[in-house]
């Protein structure tokens, strides 16, 4: 595992980093845990073109705006609890 952490300092976890064909957890799970714990990967500047970075920033801003719009449509916690108390929850 130490070798993988050293590798992941230079590149994000990837499915090819594992020697088993069927890994219990996908590489994305390692990314969620590592980056959720504040792990830093040094991505080389040559890794992304300015066009790719600009597109990524555009997508990030779009997602941020979409999330803000969805949050505005959510009921407040108090409203939600009041509705659940009044009507209950639908069976799934």
Image (cartoon, helix red, strand yellow):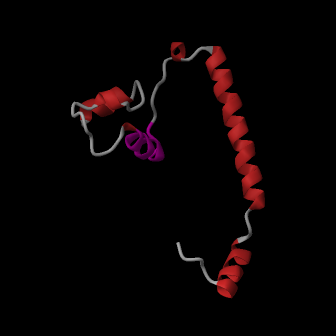
Q: Quadrant of residue 84?
A: bottom right
The verdict on residue 34 being magenta is: yes
**Placement of 49 over or under 40, stated as above or below:** above
Task: Report the predominant secondary structure element of the magenta stretch.
Answer: helix
Compared across the picture, whether 54 is left or right of 38 comes to right
Which residue is depicted at the point 69% across and 87% down?
86
Depth order, front residue of 25/8: 25
Quadrant including the N terminus:
top left
Residue 40 position, x and y percent, is 46, 34
Compared across the picture, whether 85 is left or right of 33 comes to right
Magenta range:
28-39
**Placement of 9 over or under 22, stated as above or below:** above
Residue 22 position, x and y percent, is 25, 38
Compared across the picture, whether 49 is left or right of 19 comes to right
Q: Which residue is farthest bottom?
A: 86
Which residue is depicted at the point 64% across and 27% down?
56
Q: Which residue is farthest left?
A: 20
Residue 73 position, x and y percent, is 77, 60
Compared across the picture, whether 27 is left or right of 64 comes to left
Which residue is depicted at the point 30% across and 29% down?
17
The mark total stands at 0
Depth order, front residue of 7/83: 83
Residue 20 position, x and y percent, is 21, 34
Which residue is depicted at the point 68% across and 41% down?
63
Q: Quadrant of residue 25?
A: top left
């Amino acid at each position: 595992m130490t070798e993988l952490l050293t590798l992941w300092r230079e590149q994000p976890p990837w499915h090819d980093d594992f020697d088993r064909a069927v890994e219990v957890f996908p590489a994305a799970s390692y990314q969620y845990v590592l980056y959720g714990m504040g792990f830093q990967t040094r991505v080389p500047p040559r890794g992304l073109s300015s066009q790719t970075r600009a597109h990524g920033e555009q997508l990030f801003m779009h997602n941020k705006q979409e999330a803000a719009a969805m949050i505005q449509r959510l009921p407040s916690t108090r409203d939600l609890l009041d509705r659940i108390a009044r009507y209950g929850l639908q069976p799934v």
